[in-house]
Amino acid sequence: MALWSGWSLALGVVAVAAAATRSAQPHSRTTLYIGTYTDGASRGIHSVDFDPEIPAFSTPRLVAEAVNPTFFAWHPTRPVLMAVNETDRVGPDGAGGLSSYRVGADGALTLINQVPTGGAGACHLTVDADGRHAFVANYGAGSTAQFDVRDDGTVVEPSSVQRHSGRGPHATRQTRPHAHAIEVAPGGRFVIAIDLGTDALMVHRWDAGTGTLTPHTPAILKTRPGAGPRHIAFHPNGQLAFVINELDSTLTSYAWNGVAGTLTQLSTESTLPRGWRGENTTAEVAVHPSGKFVYASNRGHDSIAIFAAGADGRLVSLGTHSTGGRTPRHFALDATGAWLLAANQESDSIVAFRIDAGTGLLSDEKARVTVPSPVFVGIRPTWSSR
């Protein structure tokens, strides 16, 4: 008995020591950069760390003063963050802004430069795979613009601006074009612009060598009238795309042919619970890293709509989950697919939800932090070189 007690005591000491060692080790934290509207309490871009092991957020800090930095993109190989300024006060012609920042070792942002975007109300941007070009959607002007990016992260004034035309049936939101997103499609041969005002998905051929965009044939794919397409997200397999439609609160899946440059509609599902009545607009769409699930945000119902994505691209609704706040304009999924981080614009909060890897469903709220008027959650990547 004494021998057994001695072993038990020894094993207990080892276990306690191991636990102490684990607790002493630094947790793996995710650094978030939060875009905001600055017509209220916010003054620009905020940074906050999220520790998934606790889980908890650190105290946010302002890392760059800026006007309405509402959407970000990261340079693929250099510590550079690019942000659009959703305004009409940049440059002599009253345009939106594209601002480029160097990310310091301490996480602070240093402005490299800012250029006008060739149209008012810049609201979305993306950067191509080699980091040499950026693309911006100007909601107010109904146009998209293309920019060269230098090796040091400097952006050059737009080399081309594509102005959209047309309208849709919605009496107030579709009286003219409203470009809402622009993305480089998988494979890097095509660029797709999304216009909410004209119910259009626009495909352009992209020559990265010469930096030129050319309308594809067919150049325009129309959505259902009045749908109001807003953002597009691609499946990890590069063969499926999902478009969130802001005005009719639906999500549409498409087959993407990266050789032919064509989108073929597969299915459309409502983002709202059956029978729910009220005012709602959708905002963001994202595909889980596993490719099995798709998430979309509802503003009004104030929820995340969850879908299973079949191998054939067809969607099956798995229900909705409250974001714990008002007006979830944007959300992000971490690289592991374990967490969804939602930005509730009108309740000044970022809220973390754990994702069930098997079902795709969200847990109850696990952590929250206060940030004024948050409209974008950007997860800082790890660059191979600095």
Image (tube, rainbow, N blue to C red):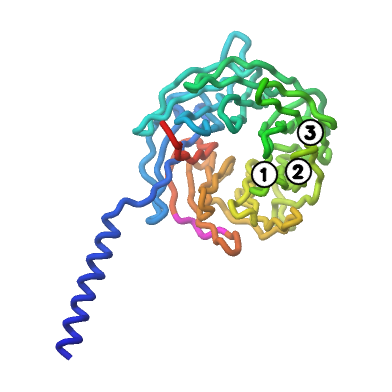
| Mark 1, other Cα within 10 Å: few <14 / some 14–19 / many ≥20 | many
Mark 1: amino acid: Phe
Q: Which mark is residue 256?
A: 2
Q: CA distance from mark 2 to mark 1?
A: 9 Å
Is residue 6 shown in magenta?
no
For label 1, the residue is 234
Q: At 51% across and 48% down in the image, what residue appears?
A: 334
| Mark 3, other Cα within 10 Å: few <14 / some 14–19 / many ≥20 | many
Above or below, 129 relative to 351: above
- Magenta part of the protein: which range? 362-366
| Residue nearer the viewer, 363 or 49 | 49
- Regarding residue 41, the answer to whether it shows in the image is no
Instruction: Determine whether the residue tagged by mark 2 lies in a helix, strand or loop.
Output: strand
Residue 339 position, x and y percent, is 51, 53
Q: Which mark is residue 200?
A: 3
Occupied quadrant, residue 17:
bottom left
User: Which quarter of the figure is the C terminus placed in?
Assistant: top left
Q: Earlier in the sequence, mark 1 or mark 3?
A: 3
Q: CA distance from mark 2 to mark 3?
A: 16 Å
